[in-house]
Amino acid sequence: MKQLIRGVGFCLIGHIVTMVFGWAGLLLVLPHPEVILNLPAFGQSFFQLSMAGGGVVNIILGAIAVAIFAYRTLGAWHWLTFMLPAVCISLSSELLGTGTGFPFGDYHYLNGLGYKIAGLVPFTIPISWFYMGLASYLIARVALKLDQKPSWVRWVGAIAIGAILFTSWDFALEPAMSQTSVPFWYWDKAGAFFGTPYQNYAGWFGTSALFMTFAAIIWTRKPLLVQQEPKQPLTRNQLGLPLIIYLSNYAYAAVLSLASGFGLPVLLGLLTGVVPAIALYAIAQPAKAPVAETKSATINTEIPIAAVKVGVK
């Protein structure tokens, strides 16, 4: 178990460190090519390698961190019954989108995100849907106390809020990935919302809500409990990593978008994603403090009285 904890920590730190390197490369080095030219041959090769594969490493580390967290906290069954629908449904939507324009609009992926499945969708895209989707859904589900007080309203609410949190990430992500000096995808026809079609956000919400619904239906067959003793429904104590994943990924995209002058989409994502995520974390029920078992001490009130002989004259 300690190895799993170390693995989560290593991958999470690496995930965030690659974001910092990404900021440095995209915002500080690329705008000043003289910096690259002044590097030794080894430094230039390292920079080229990091620019070519940094995004892939970042996404893989994030996915591994969340996968280990889910396995350790939720158990293998709940982890896999979320990850597999998330990956398969999001990949299907992406393949459909890049091939037909539905449900996101007409767009194509460029290089920089790894091997393209069917020559269309980088393999890193569906696994990013998985780890950000699970983080968003768990924040919503735990805050609504769905597993403590199950009801249809809470069940639907967790899916809707989770999908909103997930879609809000894209408000900052789209400009950062498609409208900056180093794009990772492009729109065949620029949309009305800072170059992105409104349809894209509907597609994000619909796709994420679909795989969250699929997983939520499967999860009704088995209680969602923390795997460590005492086994109980998830509480705020288990939301630390999901919140860090959500906020760090939003921050990465937000900084890149702000550097290119896209302040309004970033603000919108803050209001609909970041602020609600923090608020949901704050209202989530904390873990109950373990009650120490105390043995009741029985006080013997019987006081032995020595026999006293009374002499009568």
Image (tube, grey):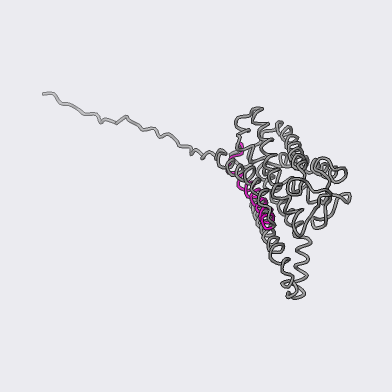
Q: Residue 224: give x, y in percent of width and height.
A: 66, 36
Is residue 239 placed above or below 44 in the rendered structure?
A: above
- Compare residues 62 and 173 and report the one nearer the observer: 173
Q: Residue at x 73, y 32 (%)?
A: 217
- Compare residues 75 and 144 and report the one nearer the observer: 144
Identity of the residue furthest to the front in this view: 192
Q: Residue 312: give x, y in percent of width and height.
A: 13, 23
Q: Quadrant of residue 45?
A: bottom right
Is residue 268 placed above or below 61 in the rendered structure?
A: above
Identity of the residue furthest to the left in this view: 313
Q: Residue 193: give x, y in percent of width and height.
A: 73, 46
Q: Main SS of the magenta segment?
A: helix
Is residue 51 placed above or below 80 in the rendered structure?
A: below
Q: Quadrant of residue 229?
A: top right
Q: Is residue 19 left or right of residue 92?
A: left
Q: Is residue 146 left or right of residue 99?
A: left
Q: Residue at x 75, y 53 (%)?
A: 177
- Compare residues 226 and 275 and report the one nearer the observer: 275
Q: Residue 139: give x, y in percent of width and height.
A: 63, 41
User: Which stretch is magenta?
Assistant: 232-259
Residue 129 part of the magenta-drawn span: no
- Compare residues 153 and 145 and report the one nearer the observer: 153
**Quarter placement of the C terminus:** top left
Is residue 251 placed above or below 34 in the rendered structure?
A: above
Residue 247 part of the magenta-drawn span: yes
| Mark count | 0
